[in-house]
Image (cartoon, helix red, strand yellow):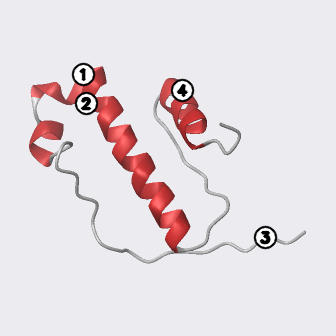
């Protein structure tokens, strides 16, 4: 079955009142709490973008295996 690949243009930038550029540039940037908050913000943005563009599948790349696993669990349709 052929698959359609969609290339989305650049859209509005992602802003989050909790995960701010100042926090991402601070000494806090390597702390697990901030990494988790950042991952949550990115997951929410990804799911919103998928819904807007009626996408069923996406591919994500992660630096850490635990983050990839967390993304899979958080966005799983199986719960």
Name the disc covering residue 31, or none.
Answer: 1
Secondary structure beneath dot 3 equals loop
Q: Residues within 10 Å of mark 4 (few under 14, many from 20)?
A: few
- Residue bearing mark 3: 3
Q: Quadrant of the N terminus?
A: bottom right
The x and y percentages for residue 76 are 64, 41
- Residue bearing mark 4: 65
Asked whether the residues under the numbered discs 2 and 1 touch, taking CB atoms below 8 Å apart as contact, a structural biologist would say yes
- Residue bearing mark 2: 34
Query: How far apart in space, not on screen, are marks 2 and 3 (Cα)?
Result: 36 Å
Query: How far apart in space, not on screen, are marks 4 and 1 (Cα)?
Result: 16 Å
The x and y percentages for residue 51 are 54, 66
Q: Sequence order check: which comes first, mark 2 or mark 4? A: 2
Q: Residue at x 73, y 74 (%)?
A: 4
Query: How far apart in space, not on screen, are marks 3 and 4 (Cα)?
Result: 27 Å
Q: Residue at x 60, y 37 (%)?
A: 72
């Amino acid at each position: 079955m052929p698959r359609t690949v969609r290339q989305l243009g650049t859209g509005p930038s992602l802003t989050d009142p909790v995960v701010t550029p100042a926090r991402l540039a601070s000494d806090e940037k390597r702390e697990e709490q901030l990494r988790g908050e950042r991952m949550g913000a990115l997951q929410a943005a990804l799911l919103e973008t998928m819904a807007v563009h009626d996408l069923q599948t996406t591919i994500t790349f992660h630096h850490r295996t635990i983050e990839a696993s967390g993304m899979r669990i958080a966005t799983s349709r199986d719960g």
